[in-house]
Image (cartoon, coloured by chain):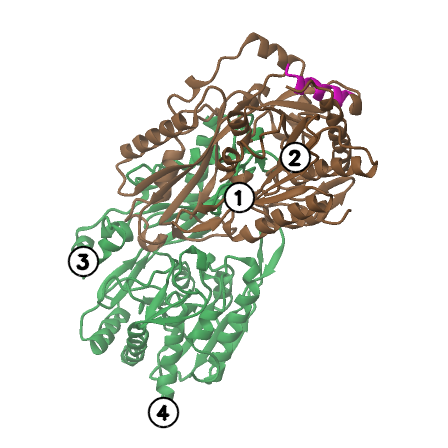
Chain colours: A green, B brown
Amino acid sequence: NLPGYGKMDWVAVESDSSDVLRRPDCHRMMDMTAEKLQAIGGKVELVDIGVQELPDGKTVALPKVVTAQFGSDPSKQTVCVYGHVDVQPAKLEDGWATEPYNLTDINGHLYGRGASDNKAPVLAWIHTVEAYQALSIDLPVNVKFIIEGMEETGSNGLDAMIVAQKGTFFSDVDYIIISDCGWLSRRPALTYGTRGNCYFFAEVEGPKQDLHSGVYGGTVIEPMTDLIGILDTLISPSGKILIPGIREAVAPLSDEEWKMYQDIEFDIESFKSKIGVDLLAHRWRYPTVTIHGIEGAFSGPGSKTVIPAKVIAKFSIRQVPNMDPAVVKKQVTDYLYSVFAKRKSPNKLKVTMIIGAKPWLADTKHPLYEAGKAAVKRVFDVEPDLIREGGTIPIAKTFEDVTGKSIIMMPIGGFDDGLHSQNEKMSRYNYIEGTKLFIAYLHEVAHLKKD
Amino acid sequence: NLPGYGKMDWVAVESDSSDVLRRPDCHRMMDMTAEKLQAIGGKVELVDIGVQELPDGKTVALPKVVTAQFGSDPSKQTVCVYGHVDVQPAKLEDGWATEPYNLTDINGHLYGRGASDNKAPVLAWIHTVEAYQALSIDLPVNVKFIIEGMEETGSNGLDAMIVAQKGTFFSDVDYIIISDCGWLSRRPALTYGTRGNCYFFAEVEGPKQDLHSGVYGGTVIEPMTDLIGILDTLISPSGKILIPGIREAVAPLSDEEWKMYQDIEFDIESFKSKIGVDLLAHRWRYPTVTIHGIEGAFSGPGSKTVIPAKVIAKFSIRQVPNMDPAVVKKQVTDYLYSVFAKRKSPNKLKVTMIIGAKPWLADTKHPLYEAGKAAVKRVFDVEPDLIREGGTIPIAKTFEDVTGKSIIMMPIGGFDDGLHSQNEKMSRYNYIEGTKLFIAYLHEVAHLKKD
């Protein structure tokens, strides 16, 4: 590794942005990112984006955003690479085979939280710059970086920063590149769409404190019973969303779109054996509701005989065109309050939407994608799959709306990397060939006509 | 404190029997109990009761049972005091105002996990022996102790130990006294019944590992959806148990029983303001279902976008005469499997009953209760309430069935002690006057005719 840090050191930082107690680690992660970019000659800034307001009214500083610049030749194209170095929560006892924050090589697979989402792709882009430097070749385009530390919880504060720097940092940017996703099979892919995400808390509060279920059971309407009851009205047993208005908002499937699906190399067998897949389209172009869990109830192993006094369900709805987060928020809250009212419960319900990220969709015939196809062809000698992502990259839509620049998503992670899951990994193959892809891509982009 | 330990040291031990990682603390707690009883002259034994089998097939040693004997005069009555020194789980972040394992005195209330359930009552019985010794008065009855460390998870291993020692340790015991419960109001009480408890795990397993809800949402039937769906069929919004056969098994309410309820000093206003009480009878003589929580789902603060692969609901049914745990087990499992089958889910359901404890009911006209009334009268100058307990003391039924001896439950804890809840406490008043009650009770029992 060059001065600064390598993948092992990056994964070792528990930069879990969802846990405010981990905020110092998130700050350290941003510092490390800035130091690394500076060490290889970048013009680096740590941009203060303010504070996060917590549910209890307190505030905590947001991780700063790192910007960097390599080259400023006005005759060259300028690309801006977006990435994030925060991660999802991970604990050994969740079922990891190795310590999640200790990057571990097993048969060429590098296991660790953030190994694929998104620390390695950010490093691969840094290695891309390093590779040109090591070969003493000028970068064929100017390269900028914008790296954040709040992606996993909705990119808090980043929207405002992009708006603020529209006329400065972003003024000379021609294209934005995002590598925060994965392939669909063993074939490399370019991504042209992502789903949005609305994340909800539904809190039912009853007694003033937890109660002994023997002593008090039968004398109170338990908040858990109410919460289970309303959660059960979100989805049918077959997976159909029951919230009125949601399914009606989905854009109809066009013939052209359906034809594109036929060309996808979709390793249905390996995908199916892994998770029991239903339909590819459901992953890309239909909404879905997931109940993630319940805070405040007993969640440990063993038995505990308590009536939880306040329970908070966490669920999210992945969104697609033409859904709108503001409308979804109203649909969900109206529906749950009306369902709850019918129960005539003495308890109190509070529904809040804590994340509202829009879906994003690009034109695969744009020159940026043609350059992407050429780079994939050069490194892997195949045509890329053109795919969408079921997950959400909230900032894509903001980049597009605020800067008006074109965006490409160029993944290097494997289809089985286990993002957000136990045993997240990236293969050495994807890490190294992925870096080569980025190197080739800068070369291809250099040949695009400047807008 | 005398040599050995006081209440502060006892509460400081995190003897949470539901968490196998805390098992060393449970062993230490039993050792401390034995040392304390030995220090004041008891003939003490630490009885090995074997191992506990864990769900993964491994075994772990059960906390030993402590027995002790003070006096063996065959012309005297012999009482055996039962208690336990294990506790329910407790964490500061659950909402405790003070560290749960650091006994804290606030305005005469002693806060700490186990302060009321059941460490202080066990110590009050020890202080009772100490009080007679300090006054150089012979104990009016022989006093035996049997103290266990697995009560909170179903008294694993104790039944077999009682059966094994029926002809030895229990052969000269006339009466069994249990002080593992609380008063109903500010008036002292004697307890003549407890509910039983059947504790169930319902596990729904789907994908091989947790999945990213964006990437996979919409392509799998999520285990959480299935689990929420079947949990929602257990109880109606108004709290009615929906499992066929349960309500039909409840013994009818007799006129005589109903009349007894009229005499109870029931601080309905303070009770009501505290937890929103419905009906006294529901606490004592009707079954109830409580959903305690879900293991395997996301339970932390903040947001996490994962589809949990395996989720385990924990729920329990408090039982009353004439319900039978074996029948309840069949009713619940049959019902849930049939409800689950109707969902036609690709996931797997496994329902297991991990605790099956019977209800217990005593005759309030028995001489043991007459002696109890006299002792309450002597110390508090009032008649005690005759009450039942909504909670479960599984071992009461075993004592009765195996030894054939009569049992009395003599609580000293306050109605608002918060057993199993945050901020569990016992007041100094209850601790000290409760000890006096025990001292007086031994005196009264000495005057009963020997069977």
The residue lying toward the viewer, choosing from A98 and A161, is A98
Q: Secondary structure at mark 3?
A: helix
Q: Amino acid at mark 1?
A: Gly
Q: Secondary structure at mark 1?
A: loop
Residue B324 image point, x, y percent: 43, 24
Left or right: residue B388 versus residue B121 is: left
Residue A73 shown in magenta:
no
Q: Which mark is residue A136?
A: 4
The residue lying toward the viewer, choosing from B351 and A115, is B351
Q: Are marks 4 and 3 in contact (CB under 8 Å)?
A: no
Residue identifier under label 2:
B144
Residue identifier under label 1:
A296
Marks 4 & 3 on one chain: yes
Q: Are marks 4 and 2 in contact (CB under 8 Å)?
A: no
Distance CA(mark 3)–CA(mark 2):
81 Å
Residue B377 image point, x, y percent: 77, 20
Distance CA(mark 3)–CA(mark 1):
45 Å
Residue B143 image point, x, y percent: 68, 33
Distance CA(mark 4)–CA(mark 1):
57 Å
Q: Secondary structure at mark 4?
A: loop
Residue B368 shown in magenta:
yes
Q: Which corner quadrant holds the C terminus of chain A?
A: bottom left
Residue beneath the point at 59% across and 11% down: B258
Residue A318 versus residue B192 in the image, above or below: below
Residue identifier under label 3:
A260
Where does the magenta region start and end?
B365-377
The chain containing the residue under callout 2 comes to B
Residue B113 versus residue A133 in the image, above or below: above
Q: Residue furthest bottom?
A: A136
Q: Amino acid at mark 3?
A: Met
Quarter occupied by residue B126: top right
Examine the residues drawn in magenta and state their main secondary structure.
helix
